[in-house]
Image: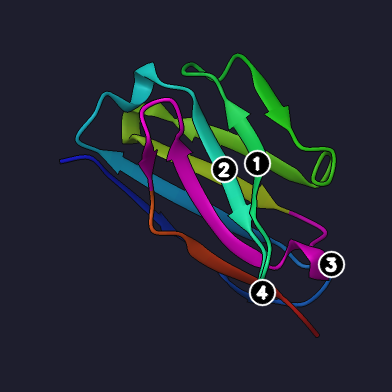
Amino acid sequence: QVQLVESGGGLVQPGGSLRLSCVGSGFTFSNHWMYWVRQAPGKGLEWVSMIKSGGEQIYYAESVKGRFTISRDNAKSTLYLLLNNLKSEDTAVYYCADAAQGYWGQGTQVTVSS
């Protein structure tokens, strides 16, 4: 069956960095656009970034542009999100997804706090 498994979240101080990973299985990862989406406490889902199947097109939400970097390694069926210069408002559960197919991971918590 299809699985997306995120990892790499944690507690970090403002200005710090984290790298999230998401390993996909059960589908042809390399054929699909992949997404990072987050949900802050008490708020709805917010799209963060997306990357085309071969990595040739990338888009970011304005709120993270210049601070976050999305990438993928299709040989490892793995999606990444590098989070730099983290702010308290980046605190959220981060999900990877193949939104077109309706595949979602279980999420990984990122907490930015001093």
Answer with the quarter of the image where residue 2 lies.
top left
- Relative side of 111 to 98, left or right: right
Of pointers 3 and 4, the one earlier in the residue sequence: 3
What residue is shown at x 69% (from left), y 40% (from top)? 69
Distance from the alpha carbon under mark 4 to that under mark 1: 18 Å
Q: Nearer the viewer, mark 3 or mark 4?
A: 4
Residues in magenta? 84-104
The residue beneath circle 1 is 47
Comes first in the chain, label 2 or label 4: 2
Establish if 43 lies above or below 26: below
Q: Quadrant of the C terminus?
A: bottom right
Looking at the picture, does residue 79 appear above or below residue 114?
Answer: above
Q: Is residue 8 visible?
A: no
Label 3 to label 4: alpha-carbon separation: 12 Å
From the image, tell me which residue sits under label 3.
15
Residue 111 numbered tag:
4
Q: Position of residue 76 (x, y in %)?
A: 33, 36
